[in-house]
Amino acid sequence: MSEPFYTIAEVAGQLKLSQKSIRRYIAANELNAIKIGTSYRIPISALENFINKPSNTEKQVQYDLFGN
């Protein structure tokens, strides 16, 4: 039996994000998806991995105050 899939619209609704944001995650290879014809389908396991993946939102920024 094959694994169920979500559409971009369904994933966007569940995560309370825009469809464009979901497409950006797919394009950046942060969310795995399968392209079927002209549309994408996201396997449930890929969505679970995306949700449970550690966040890389904290970025270390280094400032050079004196131009050195």
Image (spheres, rainbow, N blue to C red):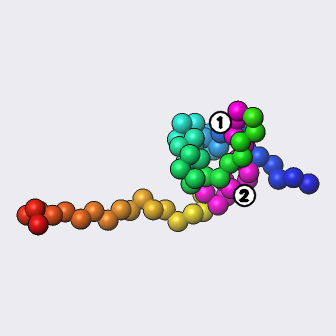
Q: Is residue 37 left or right of residue 29?
A: right
When asked about the image quadrant of residue 56, the answer is bottom left
Between 29 and 1, the residue placed more toward the observer is 29
Q: Give the answer, above or below, for where 11 lies relative to 65.
A: above
Under mark 2, the amino acid is Ser
Q: Are marks 1 and 2 in contact (CB under 8 Å)?
A: no
When asked about the image quadrant of residue 36, the answer is top right
Between 43 and 28, the residue placed more toward the observer is 28
Label 2 crowd (10 A; few <14 / some 14-19 / many >=20) = few
Q: Secondary structure at mark 2?
A: helix
When asked about the image quadrant of residue 23, the answer is top right
Under mark 1, the amino acid is Ala
Q: Give the answer, above or below, for where 29 lies relative to 60.
A: above
Q: Which residues are magenta?
A: 38-50
Residue, x 56% and y 54% (percent of image)?
Answer: 30
Q: Where is mark 1, residue-wise?
A: 9
Q: CA distance from mark 1 to mark 2?
A: 17 Å
In the drawing, what numbered circle is on residue 21?
A: none
Q: Is residue 26 visible?
A: yes
